[in-house]
Image: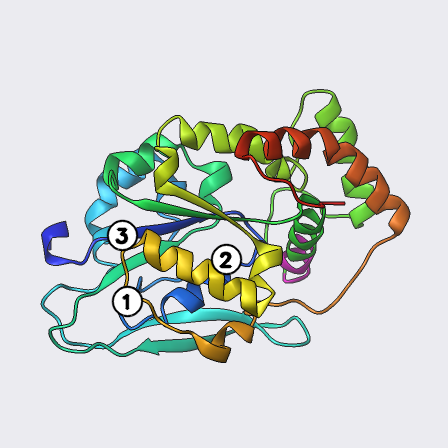
Protein backbone atom coordinates (compact mmCIF):
# COMPACT_ATOMS: atom_id res chain seq x y z
CA UNK A 1 0.00 0.00 0.00
CA UNK A 2 1.08 3.61 -0.60
CA UNK A 3 1.71 6.27 2.02
CA UNK A 4 -1.86 7.55 1.50
CA UNK A 5 -3.12 4.40 3.21
CA UNK A 6 -1.21 5.06 6.42
CA UNK A 7 -1.07 7.75 9.08
CA UNK A 8 2.28 9.25 8.14
CA UNK A 9 4.50 10.55 10.95
CA UNK A 10 3.99 14.00 12.42
CA UNK A 11 6.95 13.85 14.81
CA UNK A 12 10.38 12.27 14.84
CA UNK A 13 12.63 12.03 17.92
CA UNK A 14 15.99 12.18 16.15
CA UNK A 15 18.27 11.68 19.15
CA UNK A 16 20.62 11.86 20.81
CA UNK A 17 21.61 8.36 21.95
CA UNK A 18 21.63 7.63 25.70
CA UNK A 19 19.68 10.81 26.42
CA UNK A 20 16.36 9.42 27.70
CA UNK A 21 14.61 9.21 24.35
CA UNK A 22 13.11 5.82 25.24
CA UNK A 23 11.30 7.36 28.19
CA UNK A 24 10.15 10.36 26.15
CA UNK A 25 8.74 8.15 23.40
CA UNK A 26 6.89 5.97 25.90
CA UNK A 27 5.38 9.11 27.42
CA UNK A 28 4.28 10.47 24.05
CA UNK A 29 2.51 7.31 22.90
CA UNK A 30 0.47 7.31 26.11
CA UNK A 31 -1.31 10.41 24.81
CA UNK A 32 -4.83 9.38 23.72
CA UNK A 33 -4.31 10.94 20.26
CA UNK A 34 -0.92 9.36 19.52
CA UNK A 35 -0.34 5.94 17.97
CA UNK A 36 3.12 4.37 17.82
CA UNK A 37 5.30 3.14 15.01
CA UNK A 38 5.34 -0.66 14.98
CA UNK A 39 9.10 -0.62 15.55
CA UNK A 40 10.54 1.18 18.55
CA UNK A 41 13.55 2.35 16.55
CA UNK A 42 13.31 1.74 12.78
CA UNK A 43 16.62 3.45 11.92
CA UNK A 44 15.26 3.59 8.38
CA UNK A 45 17.14 6.67 7.20
CA UNK A 46 20.33 5.42 8.81
CA UNK A 47 20.55 2.77 6.10
CA UNK A 48 21.27 5.33 3.40
CA UNK A 49 19.65 7.05 0.45
CA UNK A 50 19.53 4.05 -1.88
CA UNK A 51 17.95 1.83 0.75
CA UNK A 52 15.38 4.53 1.54
CA UNK A 53 14.36 4.94 -2.10
CA UNK A 54 14.00 1.19 -2.59
CA UNK A 55 12.11 0.48 0.65
CA UNK A 56 10.08 3.59 1.39
CA UNK A 57 6.78 1.67 1.11
CA UNK A 58 8.02 -0.62 3.87
CA UNK A 59 8.68 2.43 6.02
CA UNK A 60 5.14 3.76 5.57
CA UNK A 61 3.81 0.31 6.47
CA UNK A 62 5.38 0.63 9.93
CA UNK A 63 2.67 3.17 10.79
CA UNK A 64 -1.03 2.58 11.57
CA UNK A 65 -3.42 2.20 8.66
CA UNK A 66 -5.83 5.11 8.34
CA UNK A 67 -8.92 2.95 7.99
CA UNK A 68 -8.00 0.32 10.56
CA UNK A 69 -9.65 0.04 13.96
CA UNK A 70 -7.04 -2.37 15.33
CA UNK A 71 -5.08 -1.56 18.42
CA UNK A 72 -1.45 -0.64 17.78
CA UNK A 73 1.41 -2.56 19.33
CA UNK A 74 5.18 -2.75 19.21
CA UNK A 75 7.93 -4.74 20.90
CA UNK A 76 9.80 -2.75 23.50
CA UNK A 77 13.42 -3.61 24.46
CA UNK A 78 13.87 -2.92 28.16
CA UNK A 79 16.64 -3.32 30.72
CA UNK A 80 15.90 -5.07 34.00
CA UNK A 81 17.55 -3.88 37.26
CA UNK A 82 20.55 -6.12 36.54
CA UNK A 83 21.10 -4.55 33.13
CA UNK A 84 19.79 -7.58 31.23
CA UNK A 85 17.90 -6.75 28.03
CA UNK A 86 14.47 -8.27 27.46
CA UNK A 87 11.44 -7.48 25.29
CA UNK A 88 7.84 -6.73 26.17
CA UNK A 89 4.87 -5.98 23.96
CA UNK A 90 3.33 -2.54 24.37
CA UNK A 91 -0.31 -2.30 23.24
CA UNK A 92 -1.90 1.10 22.55
CA UNK A 93 -5.72 1.06 22.27
CA UNK A 94 -7.33 2.70 19.27
CA UNK A 95 -10.76 4.35 19.48
CA UNK A 96 -12.98 4.48 16.40
CA UNK A 97 -13.41 7.89 14.72
CA UNK A 98 -10.75 9.56 16.87
CA UNK A 99 -8.08 11.75 15.32
CA UNK A 100 -4.56 10.40 15.67
CA UNK A 101 -1.00 11.33 14.87
CA UNK A 102 2.02 9.06 14.92
CA UNK A 103 5.78 9.31 14.96
CA UNK A 104 9.01 7.48 15.60
CA UNK A 105 12.26 7.64 17.56
CA UNK A 106 15.50 6.55 15.87
CA UNK A 107 18.05 8.18 18.09
CA UNK A 108 21.16 7.74 15.95
CA UNK A 109 19.51 10.02 13.36
CA UNK A 110 20.79 13.32 14.74
CA UNK A 111 24.47 12.42 14.54
CA UNK A 112 24.62 9.87 11.72
CA UNK A 113 21.91 10.72 9.16
CA UNK A 114 21.94 13.37 6.43
CA UNK A 115 19.13 15.84 7.27
CA UNK A 116 18.31 16.28 3.57
CA UNK A 117 17.38 12.60 3.36
CA UNK A 118 14.81 12.99 6.13
CA UNK A 119 13.53 16.21 4.54
CA UNK A 120 13.07 14.45 1.19
CA UNK A 121 10.57 11.93 2.56
CA UNK A 122 9.23 13.83 5.59
CA UNK A 123 9.14 17.48 4.45
CA UNK A 124 6.65 18.61 7.10
CA UNK A 125 8.01 16.56 10.00
CA UNK A 126 8.43 18.11 13.44
CA UNK A 127 11.72 17.13 15.01
CA UNK A 128 12.37 16.55 18.69
CA UNK A 129 15.92 16.48 20.01
CA UNK A 130 16.79 15.38 23.53
CA UNK A 131 20.31 16.22 24.73
CA UNK A 132 22.25 15.39 27.89
CA UNK A 133 25.37 16.47 29.68
CA UNK A 134 27.86 15.03 27.14
CA UNK A 135 30.07 13.57 29.88
CA UNK A 136 27.25 11.40 31.23
CA UNK A 137 26.10 10.63 27.70
CA UNK A 138 29.56 9.35 26.72
CA UNK A 139 29.77 7.17 29.85
CA UNK A 140 26.35 5.67 29.20
CA UNK A 141 27.20 5.10 25.53
CA UNK A 142 30.44 3.34 26.47
CA UNK A 143 28.59 1.10 28.95
CA UNK A 144 26.14 0.15 26.21
CA UNK A 145 28.98 -0.87 23.90
CA UNK A 146 30.58 -2.84 26.73
CA UNK A 147 27.33 -4.75 27.14
CA UNK A 148 27.12 -5.36 23.39
CA UNK A 149 30.68 -6.70 23.36
CA UNK A 150 29.94 -9.01 26.29
CA UNK A 151 26.91 -10.30 24.39
CA UNK A 152 29.21 -11.26 21.52
CA UNK A 153 28.09 -8.63 19.02
CA UNK A 154 30.52 -7.66 16.28
CA UNK A 155 31.07 -3.93 16.82
CA UNK A 156 34.01 -3.63 14.45
CA UNK A 157 36.21 -2.22 17.22
CA UNK A 158 37.49 -3.20 20.65
CA UNK A 159 35.86 -1.78 23.79
CA UNK A 160 38.34 -1.34 26.64
CA UNK A 161 37.94 0.41 29.98
CA UNK A 162 36.13 3.74 29.94
CA UNK A 163 39.25 5.64 30.99
CA UNK A 164 41.46 4.00 28.38
CA UNK A 165 38.99 4.57 25.54
CA UNK A 166 38.13 8.15 26.52
CA UNK A 167 41.70 9.34 26.95
CA UNK A 168 42.54 7.81 23.56
CA UNK A 169 39.56 9.64 22.01
CA UNK A 170 40.58 12.98 23.49
CA UNK A 171 43.97 12.59 21.83
CA UNK A 172 42.34 11.49 18.57
CA UNK A 173 39.87 14.39 18.40
CA UNK A 174 42.58 16.93 19.20
CA UNK A 175 44.40 15.61 16.12
CA UNK A 176 41.29 16.12 13.97
CA UNK A 177 39.75 12.65 14.20
CA UNK A 178 36.39 11.47 15.50
CA UNK A 179 35.52 8.97 18.18
CA UNK A 180 32.66 6.69 19.17
CA UNK A 181 31.86 8.27 22.55
CA UNK A 182 32.96 11.90 22.78
CA UNK A 183 32.29 13.11 19.24
CA UNK A 184 28.48 12.68 19.37
CA UNK A 185 28.47 14.98 22.41
CA UNK A 186 29.99 17.87 20.45
CA UNK A 187 26.47 18.99 19.63
CA UNK A 188 26.82 22.32 17.82
CA UNK A 189 28.21 21.27 14.41
CA UNK A 190 25.53 18.59 14.09
CA UNK A 191 22.76 20.96 15.17
CA UNK A 192 23.87 23.53 12.60
CA UNK A 193 23.74 20.82 9.94
CA UNK A 194 20.09 20.14 10.81
CA UNK A 195 19.26 23.85 10.97
CA UNK A 196 20.65 24.26 7.46
CA UNK A 197 17.85 21.98 6.20
CA UNK A 198 15.03 22.36 8.74
CA UNK A 199 13.70 25.66 10.00
CA UNK A 200 14.48 26.26 13.68
CA UNK A 201 10.76 26.40 14.45
CA UNK A 202 10.39 22.76 13.39
CA UNK A 203 13.09 21.42 15.74
CA UNK A 204 12.57 21.49 19.50
CA UNK A 205 15.45 20.86 21.89
CA UNK A 206 14.92 19.47 25.39
CA UNK A 207 17.31 18.21 28.06
CA UNK A 208 17.56 14.84 29.75
CA UNK A 209 18.22 16.33 33.16
CA UNK A 210 14.80 18.06 33.04
CA UNK A 211 13.03 14.91 31.90
CA UNK A 212 14.13 13.15 35.10
CA UNK A 213 12.28 15.69 37.29
CA UNK A 214 8.50 15.00 37.16
CA UNK A 215 7.45 18.65 37.35
CA UNK A 216 9.81 19.61 34.54
CA UNK A 217 8.87 16.50 32.55
CA UNK A 218 5.23 17.64 32.67
CA UNK A 219 6.31 21.02 31.30
CA UNK A 220 8.25 19.34 28.49
CA UNK A 221 5.26 17.21 27.55
CA UNK A 222 2.93 20.20 27.65
CA UNK A 223 5.28 22.08 25.31
CA UNK A 224 5.48 19.11 22.96
CA UNK A 225 1.68 18.86 22.88
CA UNK A 226 1.50 22.48 21.74
CA UNK A 227 4.28 21.84 19.23
CA UNK A 228 2.35 18.90 17.76
CA UNK A 229 -1.07 20.59 17.95
CA UNK A 230 -2.34 17.94 20.36
CA UNK A 231 -5.04 18.53 22.98
CA UNK A 232 -3.65 18.80 26.49
CA UNK A 233 -3.30 15.51 28.33
CA UNK A 234 -2.23 15.13 31.96
CA UNK A 235 0.24 12.25 32.21
CA UNK A 236 -0.08 12.16 36.01
CA UNK A 237 2.41 9.90 37.78
CA UNK A 238 3.34 8.13 34.54
CA UNK A 239 6.25 10.54 34.04
CA UNK A 240 7.89 9.26 37.21
CA UNK A 241 8.82 6.10 35.28
CA UNK A 242 12.17 5.82 33.55
CA UNK A 243 12.66 3.28 30.79
CA UNK A 244 15.84 1.47 29.70
CA UNK A 245 17.57 2.60 32.88
CA UNK A 246 20.88 0.85 33.38
CA UNK A 247 22.19 -0.11 36.84
CA UNK A 248 24.11 2.64 38.61
CA UNK A 249 27.81 2.98 37.89
CA UNK A 250 30.44 5.69 38.19
CA UNK A 251 33.97 6.71 37.25
CA UNK A 252 36.67 8.79 38.89
CA UNK A 253 36.34 12.50 39.56
CA UNK A 254 39.79 12.98 38.04
CA UNK A 255 38.64 11.53 34.73
CA UNK A 256 35.43 13.52 34.89
CA UNK A 257 37.47 16.69 35.30
CA UNK A 258 39.56 15.85 32.21
CA UNK A 259 36.44 15.22 30.11
CA UNK A 260 34.83 18.40 31.45
CA UNK A 261 37.86 20.44 30.40
CA UNK A 262 37.74 18.82 26.96
CA UNK A 263 34.06 19.65 26.47
CA UNK A 264 34.07 23.16 27.98
CA UNK A 265 34.73 25.17 24.78
CA UNK A 266 32.31 23.01 22.77
CA UNK A 267 29.57 23.44 25.39
CA UNK A 268 30.11 27.19 25.60
CA UNK A 269 29.75 27.53 21.83
CA UNK A 270 26.64 25.35 21.83
CA UNK A 271 24.88 27.29 24.59
CA UNK A 272 25.79 30.60 23.01
CA UNK A 273 24.18 29.41 19.78
CA UNK A 274 20.91 28.27 21.38
CA UNK A 275 20.76 31.16 23.85
CA UNK A 276 20.71 29.02 26.98
CA UNK A 277 23.15 27.88 29.62
CA UNK A 278 23.36 24.80 31.80
CA UNK A 279 25.82 23.59 34.40
CA UNK A 280 27.30 20.69 32.45
CA UNK A 281 30.31 19.85 34.58
Q: Which quadrant, please, contains the C terminus?
A: top right
Q: Which residue corresponds to mark 3? A: 10
Q: Which residue corresponds to mark 2? A: 21
Q: Which residue corresponds to mark 1? A: 35
Magenta range is 145-151
The residue sitting at the right extreme is 254
Is residue 41 in view from this perspective? Answer: no
| Residue closest to the eye, 91 or 257 | 257
Look at the numbered disc 2 and give the secondary structure of its residue. helix
Distance Cα–Cα, label 1 vs label 2:
17 Å
Q: Earlier in the sequence, mark 1 or mark 2?
A: 2
Q: Within 10 Å of the Cα at label 1, are there few (<14), some (14-19), or many (20+) other Cα atoms? A: many
Q: Which of marks 3 and 1 is nearer the N terminus?
A: 3
Look at the numbered disc 3 and give the secondary structure of its residue. loop
x and y percentages locating residue 229 in the rendered image? 27, 56
Q: What predominant SS class does the magenta segment belong to?
A: helix
x and y percentages locating residue 92 in the rendered image? 31, 76
Tell me which residue sits at (36%, 68%) in the image.
29
* Left or right: 207 as drawn, with respect to 142: left
* Left or right: 98 as drawn, with respect to 119: left
x and y percentages locating residue 242 in the rendered image? 56, 70
Q: Within 10 Å of the Cα at label 3, are there few (<14), some (14-19), or many (20+) other Cα atoms? A: some
Distance Cα–Cα, label 2 vs label 3:
17 Å
- Image colouring: rainbow
Tell me which residue sits at (66%, 25%) in the image.
177
Look at the numbered disc 1 and give the secondary structure of its residue. strand
Q: Earlier in the sequence, mark 2 or mark 3?
A: 3
Amino acid sequence: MASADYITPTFFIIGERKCGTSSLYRYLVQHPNVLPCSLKEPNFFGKGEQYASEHIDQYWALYPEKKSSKHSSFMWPELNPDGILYEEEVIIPRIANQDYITGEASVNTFYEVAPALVKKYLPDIKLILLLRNPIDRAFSHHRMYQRFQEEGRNLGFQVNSFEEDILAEIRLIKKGGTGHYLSPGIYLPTLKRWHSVFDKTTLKIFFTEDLKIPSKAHNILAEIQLFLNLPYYNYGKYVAQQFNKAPLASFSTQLRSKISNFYQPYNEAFFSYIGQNRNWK
